[in-house]
Image (cartoon, helix red, strand yellow):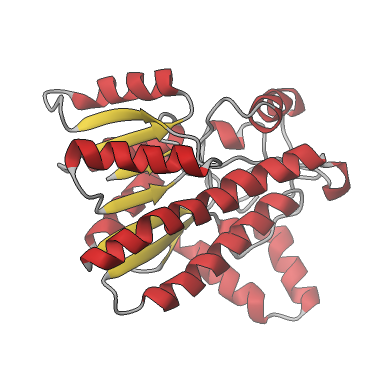
Amino acid sequence: MAVTGGAHGIGREIARQLAAAGARVAIGDRDLDAALTTAEELTGERHDDVAAFELDVTDTTAFSAFLAAVEHRWGPIDVLVNNAGVMWVGPFEAESDTAAQRQVDVNLHGVIRGVKLMAPAMRERGHGQIITMASGASKLAPAGEATYAATKHAVYGYLNAVRTELHGSGVRLSVIMPAVVETELAVGTATGPVRRLVAADVAKAVLDVVRRPRFEVTVPYRVGLVARLAAVLPDPARFRLLRAVVPNQVTGVTDRAIRATYENRSLTDPSPTVEQRGAPE
């Protein structure tokens, strides 16, 4: 199994739980030193079953090299977890072109790239699974996360279309859509009335969908219920519902300084890796 953005946060916890369940796990990350440290921490007595690899999901050559290195080590990849992601929050008109482009490159094109590179080989073998960490923002577009939500809407739509093409092939696609998770990506943001998740909550959902494949998973389940209700309500009622349950990041950021530190590093300097976090926010 291969996990992108696996050195920190949700990706690290996904790798940990998969390894604990007995899987061989490849940790892919731009921050190779952190990936190596994570792999060393997770190996325990199973030194040959968790390994770190350098990975840039925005580069096709690098992504191909990552997959090839994993398969050279262990053979065909049965499960790919598209986890890497970044997020900018604030008023839509204040977002820089650089921040917007970076989110599209990592959150959307990184997922498309992983599917294009992995799914055809899985289809040829007649089995395989690609699990993508999306967000509650795939269904509920939070104020202050316009481009982030756009990438997650697009990821959901892309995967829905591709799974139609793959129907009957033995290749399963799954999309995980969590609420706010306590990770670096969410640092300084508002959480609203919904309990902030921890990475273990989301990793558990990934492990569960490996064991019982299905396309759409929200964490917690009620996020999906709210999204379905919001989709059928008239606008006045819909906006009242969203104000009640979805944090507003235009007005709700709790620590702008720490938020700026994260965004300056992850959205203007492409060298660090950051992990995927869910919304709605």
Percent x, y for residue 182? 51, 36
> Residue 130 sits in which quadrant?
bottom left
In the rendered view, tell whether residue 169 sits above or below residue 177: below
- Location of residue 45 with respect to 250 vertically, above or below: above
Q: Which of 203 and 85 is in front in this view?
A: 85
Point 67% across, 41% down: residue: 102
128 up-or-down from 20: above or below: below
Q: Is residue 112 left or right of residue 39?
A: right
Percent coordinates x, y for residue 76 in the rendering: 22, 50
**Residue at the left extreme, as displayed:** 45
**Which residue is found at the position 70% from the left and 40% from the top?**
88
Quarter of the rendering occupied by the N terminus: top left
Residue closest to the eye, 236 or 166: 166
The answer to whether residue 178 is visible is no
Coordinates of residue 202 in the picture (x, y in percent)? 40, 48
Who's the residue at 24% across and 42% down the image? 71
Q: Position of residue 234 (x, y in %)?
A: 75, 81
The image quadrant that residue 2 belongs to is: top left
Q: Pick out the residue farthest to the right.
A: 93
Considering every residue shown, the one lying at the far front of the view is: 61
Q: Is residue 279 left or right of residue 89?
A: left
